[in-house]
Image (cartoon, grey):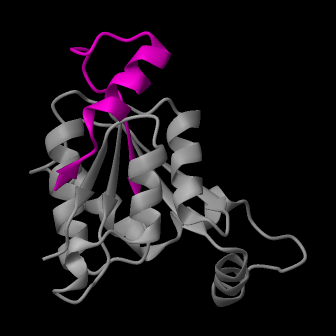
Amino acid sequence: MVDSNTTNRDRSRYQRGEDRGQSVSSIVVAVSEMDSDQIDNVSDVVAEVAGPAHATVHLVCPFSADEFETTITRLEYDAESPPEPDELAKRSQSVRDVATELRDPARNYGMPITVHGRISDDIGEAIVDIATEVTADRVVICGGNRSPTRKAIFGSTSQYALLNSPCPVTFVRDD
């Protein structure tokens, strides 16, 4: 895991007028297509941070315009009256898997979970926008599958979130 630098944290808390010692009340978790190892790793981190504080967990599932259209077709929605992005996000397998893991009795601390869908061609920007909207205290993102050489380099989505998030970002590496 990599935590964003303190400059970002201090700026965010200063902008919101918070004391640094204040507990976490809202966490944004970027959820896209993940394999089971990633789901377990992200769920462990989120439960560790959000659970004891009973923080609200915001599962964010961004779709590109093409992904949104493809998913509508695959799930047999009427293309003439498509569902809201939040509704489609709730049907995402990764979102359901992360929510299930977080509700597992071994991890569930009674933290509320909400799901957000967003249509955007810039996934990092969508994550940061939702973090700003919900006044998140932390953003959790997961690294994609990379070769050993490229593991040291963040992807563009992760990099955007790390540099632009209104709060600290926890980057969960894949194993």
Q: Is residue 93 left or right of residue 78?
A: left
Q: How many numbered marks does the figure carry?
A: 0
The picture quadrant where one finds residue 126 is: bottom right
Say which residue appears at 26% left-offset and 32% top-offset: 6
| Residue 53 position (above or below residue 27) | above
Say which residue appears at 19% left-offset and 74% top-offset: 174
Q: Give, as a single range, the part of the protein colored magenta.
A: 1-30
Asked if residue 145 lies in the magenta stretch, the reply is no
Residue nearer the viewer, 107 or 63: 63
Residue nearer the viewer, 171 or 89: 171
Q: Is residue 119 left or right of residue 135?
A: right
Tell me the quarter of the image containing the N terminus: bottom left
Q: Residue furthest left?
A: 106
| Residue 25 position (above or below residue 173) | above
Residue 55 appearing in the image: yes
Residue 88 location (% of width, % of height)? 62, 67
Residue 15 location (% of width, % of height)? 49, 18
Asked if residue 26 lies in the magenta stretch, the reply is yes
Q: Residue furthest right?
A: 80
Q: Is residue 67 left or right of residue 30?
A: right
Residue 172 location (% of width, % of height)? 22, 61
Say which residue appears at 19% left-offset and 86% top-offset: 149
Say which residue appears at 80% left-offset and 70% top-offset: 82
Tell me the quarter of the image containing the C terminus: bottom left
Residue 84 location (% of width, % of height)? 72, 59
Residue nearer the viewer, 162 or 49: 162
Residue 109 appearing in the image: no
| Residue 162 position (above or below residue 24) | below
| Residue 108 position (above or below residue 143) | above
